[in-house]
Image: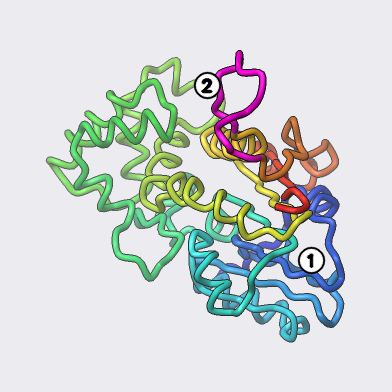
Amino acid sequence: MVEFSHIPVLLNEVIENLKIKEDGIYFDGTLGGGGHSEQILKRLGASGRLVATDQDREAIESTRNRLSEYADKLTIVKSNFVNIDTILKDLGINGLDGILLDLGVSSYQLDNKDRGFSYREDAPLDMRMDKDSGKTAEDIVNDYTEGDLTRIIREYGEDPFAARIAKAIVAAREKNRIMTTFQLNEVIKSALPEKVKRKAGHPAKQTYQAIRIELNHELEVLEQSLDKMIDLLNPGGRLCVITFHSLEDRIVKNIFKNAMNPCICPPEFPVCVCGRKSRGDVVTRKPIAPGEEELSINPRAKSSKLRVFEKKVGR
């Protein structure tokens, strides 16, 4: 079995922006290989605490063992971070001093070909972040209508050839069910013009992103989580979110912006009468990107962006 990789993206920037207090309570909603969690735990004192969640049972088992020396201040829960409110309620925690989300697919999930996340390895079409869930990428590819396939590839993959790819998938599956990554790759390639296939980057990348996002409800979960997380922060607490593509980043940017400036009064009004109050400040007016040194060590960090929100004192 492939070991969980724990090269944490934007680690120094995350730790700097979380402003960790020794006696603070923190939440890592995307435990993965535990790279970020480990550095948070190292900075916590005896009364500090970290609650971490992940949907991947294999990640939890591997990382729990790796971080066993911190067992007295680490609580790991198998769940999606969208359930943060109920998780904290069950643990008797009323507020947090910091929250981290490192979105996207872990290196382990990409490198373990049996998970079916990578178009570079021939494997069953799976792509489930939670292997205990039912539907797989194979079900989406073979059961979605041509219209629905077009929609998700266009919206979530931002692929201008979405309609052509969807049409090719439907035509191919009428002959034989599409069950593996390499089968899907060939179908996608058959739908694209030669000049597109000659461009840098794998031609299936955007379709895989779209299927993965749809299967795991990634954007819906993110949209449903951020406001709850801001509410759960203690005054001065910070929410750090690392995104890997424009759709995620746009959601984070807009929710943070609205939380800082929620007023809906017409601009010509001399004073606010809507009653909506700012919940805090966007710390990162522009997202933080990895530097050249990090990219030389971890090329997968290339598209990552970090945005930070700080809860207003007294809110």
Q: Residues within 10 Å of mark 1 (few under 14, many from 20)?
A: many
Magenta stretch containing residue 275, yes or no?
A: yes
Magenta stretch containing residue 250, yes or no?
A: no
Residue 309 percent coordinates (x, y): 71, 45
State the mark number for residue 199: 2
Which residue is found at the position 45% from the left and 41% from the top? 209
Q: Residues within 10 Å of mark 2 (few under 14, many from 20)?
A: few
Which residue is found at the position 74% from the left and 30% from the top? 286
Magenta range is: 263-277
Q: 120 above or below 249? A: below
| Quadrant that contains the N terminus | bottom right
Q: 114 above or below 244? A: below
Label 1 sits on a secondary structure element that is helix
Quarter-wise, where is residue 61 in the image?
bottom right
Direction from residue 85 to residue 99 in the image, left or right: right
Name of the residue lying farthest toward the left: 174
Depth check: give the residue in front, 29 or 89.
89
Depth check: give the residue in front, 81 or 112.
81
**Residue type beneath disc 1:** Ile
Which of the two discs, 1 and 2, sits closer to the camera? 1
State the mark number for residue 40: 1
Which residue is found at the position 75% from the left and 56% from the top? 235
**Residue type beneath disc 2:** Lys
Residue 30 percent coordinates (x, y): 60, 60
Q: Earlier in the sequence, mark 1 or mark 2?
A: 1
Quarter-wise, where is residue 308 in the image?
top right
